[in-house]
Image: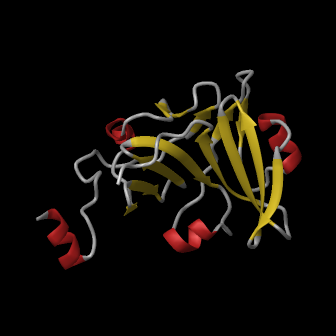
Amino acid sequence: MFNSIIKLFGRSPNPTAEWPPHSKRELVYDLRSRSVNGLKHGGAFKDARTFGQCDDFTRRDGYLDLFYRQSGLILEFASDQLIGVDFVVGRDSFQVKEHKMGVSFPVIIDGDGQRHVITDSSTLQGLTSCFGKPVESAPAGDDMVHSFAILKNVVETYHNKNSGKLLYLEICETNDAKPPKG
């Protein structure tokens, strides 16, 4: 029946519709605990309730992404487990255009407990003080991507190739949840 409804109307219902309304708040990602505002990588979908209703979502082949436009936050799930956290920090990010995302100013807590506020003007040099030296840097379309590995986190920062401005960052665990079955 559920699949018939999706075929008729082309979209499944919002999986967070029963959650409380979302309200913008400070976003803090702790590299030590691999968590955003207490929601740990590998944490259950139901535990994301603390973020409230999402503004939009995409669902495909066992994967679910929740978009919190006002906060510039995307939570990525596979098999009901959190596998990725994206922060949109630059107005020129494709996420702003494609998903009507706002920007965020996440706080990253590094391995020493130091707080780093990330913005679109965060430089590669500044990011290395938080994440260490990139393990890889490579162009990706119109962007330059720098990949970092720190405390079982993989952090990818996407920068405008021309201006160097930070557009967004993705954080996942080095031992991501198992891919969905099927």
* Residue 149 percent coordinates (x, y): 73, 38
Q: Is residue 17 left or right of residue 65?
A: left
**Residue 47 point in image, percent of width and height:** 36, 35
Residue nearest the observer in this picture, 16 or 27: 16
Displayed quadrant of residue 49: top left
74 to 134, vertically: above or below: below
Q: Is 18 on the left-hand or right-hand side of 114?
A: left
Q: Position of residue 90 (x, y in %)?
A: 68, 61
Q: Which residue sits at x=86%, y=70%? A: 162
Q: Residue farthest to the top? A: 112
The image position of residue 45, as x and y in percent, is 36, 41
The residue that appears at 71% across and 45% down in the rendered structure is: 118
Residue 110 as seen in the image, left or right of residue 55: right
Outermost residue to the bottom: 8
- Quarter placement of the C terminus: bottom left
Residue visible at 29% across and 51% down? Answer: 16
Q: Is residue 158 visible?
A: yes
Determine the residue located farthest toward the left in the rendered image. Answer: 1
Task: Look at the image and tell me in which quarter the N terminus lies.
Answer: bottom left
